[in-house]
Image: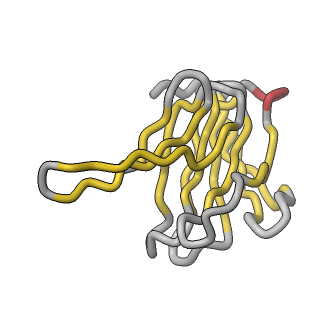
Amino acid sequence: LYFSAQEGILVFYHIKELQYEMKICADISQPICSLVFSPDYTSLLLVTDQGTVYSYKPAHSGEAVKLLDTSSSCFLAADFLTPGNNYCVSVTISGEVQVWSLEDGTFLSKLNLGTEVHV
C-alpha cells in the first residue's frame, strides 16, 4: 500500500496478515494530491497541487525524480497516456491538455478544450 502525506512524503506499507512494516520512499517537500500507477505497475506518478510531477519506480527504491513542472499553467491533474509508460497527459484549469515525455520531461503537444476544467 502506497500512501502520501500532506508534507510530501511517499510511504509504503508492507502488510502481511496482522503485521505491517512502514518505509518512507521519498520526500518531495510538496503536498501530493494524487498517486497514479503506470499500466504495468512499474512506475508511480506523484502529482503535487503546485503543478509538479515526479516519477517513482518501486522496484528501484530510489528517490522520486522530477519529470515536469507546470506550475505556471494552473495545473489540475496528470495521468499516464496508454499504452505504455513513455508519455504523460496533464490538464490545466483553463482546459489545456498537454502531452509530455516521461523520459526527460519534454513538452510534446497540447490541445485547448476551450472550456474550464474541474475535477
Question: Outermost residue, left direction?
Answer: 17
Q: Is residue 39 above or below residue 105?
A: below
Q: Position of residue 78 (x, y in %)?
A: 59, 45
At a point 45% along the width and 28% down the height, the residue shown is 119
Residue 107 falls in image quadrant: bottom right
The answer to whether residue 102 is visible is yes
Residue at left offset 75%, top offset 51%? 110
Please give left or right for residue 15 compared with residue 39 in the image: left
Q: How is the image coloured?
A: secondary structure
Residue 34 position, x and y percent, is 50, 38
Residue at image x 61%, y 63%?
A: 61
Locate residue 3, reporting x and y percent. Answer: 42, 40
Name the residue at 64% across, 45% down.
26
From the viewer's perspective, tell me whether residue 48 is left or right of residue 70: left
Count of all numbered marks drawn on residues in the image: 0
- Residue 100 in percent (x, y) is at 75, 58
**Residue 35 shown left or right of residue 93 in the figure:** left
| Residue 114 is at least partly visible in this image | no
